[in-house]
Structure formats: C-alpha cells, structure tokens
Amino acid sequence: MIRISFNKTGDIISGFECKGHSMAAEHGQDIVCAAVSSACLMAANTVTEVIGLNADAAAADGYLRLDIKESPNRAQDVLNGLMLHITELEKQYPDNIKVIFLEV
C-alpha cells in the first residue's frame, strides 16, 4: 500500500512523505503507482525548481519526501492540488492508497 502523509499546520501544508507500493499490478504495469509517483514528483519539482523554495527532498524506489524549509505560503496551490489529486485517487483505490494528515 502507498501511504502519503501531508504535514500541516492549520490549513498550511509544509511538506509530504510518500512511501510504499500500491501492489495493484506487476512492477512496470501499475497505473496506481505511476499516477501517485508522477503527481508527487511534479509537485516536488514545481516547489523546488519553478517556485524556487528552499526544501529538503529525498527520493528512492517507493519513497519521496519534501519538507519546505522556509515559508510554504507560495507553494500552497501546488500542495493543495497534490492533496486533492491523491485523496481522489484514494477514493478510487482504497485498498492501495492511504492518505494521512499530520499536524506539525
């Protein structure tokens, strides 16, 4: 199962951590994993490379983390878009995706 946790302070998202595999299909054929991975990478790259915020990011097989190290206000549209996208995927694939909200 893919578990993605969003770090929030009130309504402000300061980062996320995504780990695991959906196990919906064989490696290379798993559209659930591909959808989540692509969305998370796009959000992390947009925050760091397009918006230019200072962030700590890490990626490995089945793992992606983004922690914004400065005010995350300018990244809220991107991070809220990711959260909406992932929660909608969770509704479609409840056995494969679990969304968690952590108050930090």
Image (cartoon, rainbow, N blue to C red):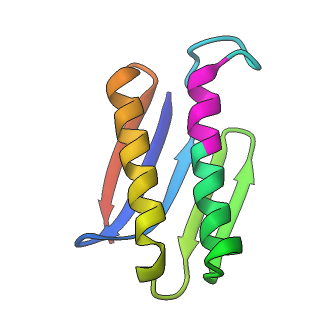
Q: Indicate the position of residue 50 as horizontal and vertical percent values.
A: 67, 73
- Residue at image location 74% in from the left, 40% down from the top: 61
Regarding residue 50, the answer to whether it shows in the image is yes
The outermost residue toward the left is 10
On the image, which quarter does residue 65 sit in? bottom right
Q: Position of residue 63 (x, y in %)?
A: 65, 46
Q: Is residue 74 magenta?
A: no
Q: Main secondary structure of the magenta part?
A: helix
In the rendered view, tell whether residue 58 sits above or below residue 48. Answer: above
Q: Is residue 23 above or below residue 102?
A: above
Point 47% across, 39% down: residue: 3
Q: State which quarter of the image contains the C terminus.
A: bottom left
Residue 64 visible:
no
Residue 54 vs 65, above or below: the answer is below
Look at the image and give the residue range highlighted in magenta: 30-38
For this view, does 89 lie left or right of residue 24? left
Q: Quadrant of residue 49?
A: bottom right
Seen in the image, is 99 located left or right of residue 52?
Answer: left
Q: Which residue is painted at 71% across and 15% down in the image?
A: 29
Q: Assess whether residue 37 is covered by the magenta stretch.
A: yes
The percent position of residue 88, horizontal first and vertical second, equals 35, 35
User: Residue at 42% across / 54% down in the picture?
Assistant: 81
